[in-house]
Amino acid sequence: MHKTLRGFLLLCAVSLALSVIGPGGLLPAFAWDDDDCVGCHGDPSIAEEGGAYLYVDPARFEQTSHADVGCTSCHDSVTDDHPEDDQRPSRAGCGECHDDVEAEYAESSHSESADCTDCHNPHNVRPLVGVSAVEVNRTCMECHGEEDVVASHGVWLPQTTLHIRSMPCIACHTASEEFTVTFYVESVTHGMSLDPTASPATHDQLMAMANEKEGVASILDGDGDERISIEELRTFYQKAKARDMRLWGMMTPEQVTHDFTTLDNRWDCSFCHARGPETLQESFVALPGPHGGYERIPVESNAVLGALYGSPDFYMIGATRSKVLTLLGALIVLGGLAVPVFHGTVRLLTMRYRRREK
């Protein structure tokens, strides 16, 4: 009986040791999870201690695609004693996951001047549809100054500033595909000059117009069906005008490459100013979220074509049209043709009568 009890206790001790030490005989490393990392790096005060790059906004990071893979997938050398060990954790190379993009980018002229993180913050990276076209251009102009961009394009491009405001740089300077029209709500400031200035409206500005329970989307999607009708666009404009706001449309690509080449058709005005690609007839409204990023809501099909009805501040020659203007134009043409036809017909019918008078 004594031996049996001693054997049982020994078995319990071995089982406990294996559960703590593991069958391999080595103590397992401390398992860091994202909450542990955000506990320190999500506190803004960490920037004061070691630099701004150490701070990661947890709300913004949570909305990125990188949040799905976790912190230690990229920083896998974090030790149990971090940060007391004074060792800077390793950082994964972007090409470890995005090898196809890295290979394409390596062949571009940009690769000699900028790394991935010069344009993309890995802790705030979002898909293209979640970033405003204004932000895309702002990133480009951190290296390419706005004045220089306007000057270089102004040599051949009429209304240069308007064009630059109407599309992201990557629309022309990459082999982007499938373009559509994306509307952003702008806050308009009327200064001393005749031309007002405008900037993307913030989430807080739009919440002042919105139903607090339903969120920012309610300023346009009144019935909550996740689709904006022309009638809802009209209702929005009635409210927005009083608050010095408007919708500003930009032609944005649905797919973008990293080759940074300018295709020959980008020099052709008809690339934008023609009714061609079906995607150009579709449109979205992109609304800012509370923690950065944008959420798109589709607009009623062909609403972008009714400039006078749905989006009076947006008109792209050749790609948009107004039914009213189309009708008026047709009446003017028909009226112009009717005058000579009527006049000729009357003269033909009265020819014999006029000859008798002579």
Image (cartoon, grey):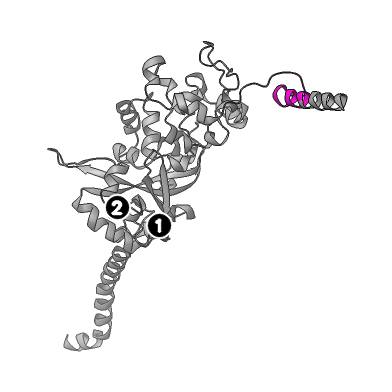
Q: Which residue position holds label 2?
A: 210
- Quadrant housing the C terminus: bottom left
Q: Which residue position holds label 1?
A: 299
Write the start and end of the magenta stretch as one range: 13-27
Q: Is residue 262 above or below residue 313?
A: above
* Residue 96 in which image quadrant: top right
Give the camera-side residue of 151 and 308: 308
Is most of the magenta stretch helix, strand or loop? helix
Give the camera-side residue of 69 and 132: 69
Label pair 2/1, CB-CB below 8 angstroms:
no
Q: Is residue 183 above or below residue 227?
A: above
Q: Earlier in the sequence, mark 2 or mark 1?
A: 2
**Count of marks, rendered view:** 2
- On the image, the x and y values in percent for residue 2 come to 85, 24
Report if residue 16 lies within the magenta region. yes
Q: Is residue 215 above or below residue 264?
A: below
- On the image, the x and y values in percent for residue 70 come to 56, 31
- Say which residue appears at 24% left-offset and 73% top-offset: 339
